[in-house]
Amino acid sequence: MSSKLEQLQALLAPVVEALGYECWGIEFLSQGRHSLLRVYIDHANGVLIDDCEKVSRQISGVLDVEDPISNEYTLEVSSPGMDRPLFTLDQFARNAGEQVKIRLRSPFEGRRNFQGLLRGVEDQDVVVLADDHEYLLPIDLIDKANIIPRFD
């Protein structure tokens, strides 16, 4: 995790949690002069647009005061959705048994993309069964991971 992302996580997660939501994850996509700050929130009862608006107002106030992002940016507050991104070892463990798609920052055993059954976690590794082979992917190598939605 980059230091900017760690700084934003430390600043914003307590704000989200004080409002009664889980801070599912934060993405900061620096795109030159116009960056995107996306904050995912979750709640046992689900997340509605009103929830996103309430959290967005609080986060905006904190960002205005603390000013951690020097250039222009767009703030998005969203539910993780059905294809929820996974950020932490705890989230990977809680979603064991789901189908996942994982992209790594750099190749691991000759590949960067994995799609398969999430088995869980082992120490600092995410365990995925892909192409009839079990992989232990170091959490630090994971660039992006998402649940593949099931429509039963």
Image: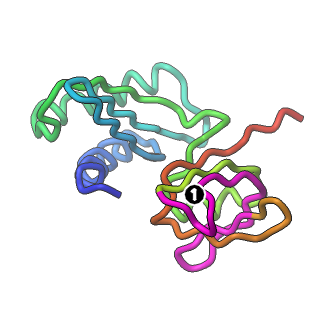
Left or right of 111 in this view: 40: left
- Quadrant where the image shows the N terminus: bottom left
Above/below status of 67 relative to 98: above
Q: Residue 122 colored magenta? A: yes
Determine the residue located farthest toward the bottom in the rendered image. Answer: 123
**Amino acid residing under circle 1:** Gln
At horizontal 30% and vertical 50% (from top left) the residue drawn is 5
Relative to 135, 88 lies left or right: left
Residues drawn in magenta: 106-128
> Is residue 86 shown left or right of residue 115?
left
Q: Give x and y (percent) for residue 128.
A: 71, 64
Q: Is residue 58 left or right of residue 72?
A: right
For residue 71, which quarter of the picture? top left
- Report helix, strand or loop for mark 1: helix
Q: Position of residue 121 (x, y in %)?
A: 63, 71
Name which quarter of the figure residue 84 lies in.
top right
The residue labelled by disc 1 is 91
Q: Residue at x 30, y 55 (%)?
A: 2
| Residue closer to the observer: 2 or 46 | 2
For the C terminus, which image quadrant? top right
Q: Name the residue: 70% across, 50% down.
A: 100
